[in-house]
Image (cartoon, rainbow, N blue to C red):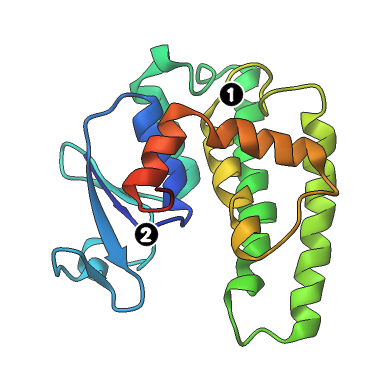
Amino acid sequence: MKLYYYPGACSLAAHIVLREGGFAFDLERVDLATGKTETGADFRAINAKGYVPALILDDGQLLTEDQVILQYLADQKPDAGLAPPAGSMERYRLMEWLAFIATEVHKGFGPLWNPATPEVTRQGALALLAKRFDFLATALAGKDWLMGDRFTVADAYLCTVLGWTAFHKIDLAPWPVLAAYLGRASARPAVQTAMKAEGLVG
């Protein structure tokens, strides 16, 4: 398999899961500004959507969208315990978390990435993210991970997007549960290895 990624982007979630699951894979960095990969390939010719993550499977098929890639990978290595069994109620709870992270947290950061975003819009986005953080802090109270005591693909996704708070200088002090959660996730060997491979940590 080959993962097309941009350092620290949402593709980091798939990168973490590849390492948590012990997969054999290649990495290829994408320059999102130029649309070229590190080998000079036209990324849009690989993924017409033009954004990461994009995963080339061993049979040559392309798979995109974090929610789907994460579940696909978990299902290839069920013994790794990165997702509950398909068809179980717990699996639907995992899917519920993945959808929430994608639509309410990940996309909630959207206006913050654009330097042309008006300040009033930016403040509105921050206020909405604060509400989502309130919900997450309550849900994680007394638990190590979103699904309880086991790290899943949902945690790989959430710790990736929560990591963006540092870039945007969002202080997690009002949410000590989230700060502790991010610290636990960031300390995992697979997370550290993925972040080092992307040049995010020394």
Indicate which disc residue 91 carries: 1
Does 59 sit left or right of 161 as displayed?
left
Query: How many neighbours does mark 1 have within 10 angstroms: few (below 14), some (14-19), or many (20 or more)?
Result: some
Q: CA distance from mark 2 to mark 1?
A: 28 Å
- The spot of residue 99 in percent (x, y) is 62, 44
What number of labels is visible?
Answer: 2
Q: Amino acid at mark 2?
A: Tyr
8 lies above or below 159:
below
Q: Secondary structure at mark 2?
A: loop
Do we see residue 69 in this rendering? Answer: no
The image quarter in which residue 77 lies = top left
Q: Indicate which label's residue lies in the foreground, 2 or 1.
A: 2
- Where is residue 195 shown, x and y percent of the image? 41, 45
Under circle 1, the secondary element is helix
Q: Quick check: 25 above or below 87?
A: below
- The kind of residue tagged 1 is Arg
Residue 41, position as x, y percentages in the image:
15, 68
Crowding at dot 2, Cα within 10 Å, few <14 / some 14-19 / many 20+, comes out as many
Q: Can you tell which quarter of the image residue 112 is in?
A: bottom right
Image: 137 above or below 65: above
Q: Which mark is residue 119?
A: none
Disc 2 marks which residue?
A: 6
Residue found at x 68% / y 62%: 108
In this image, 153 relative to 165: left or right? left
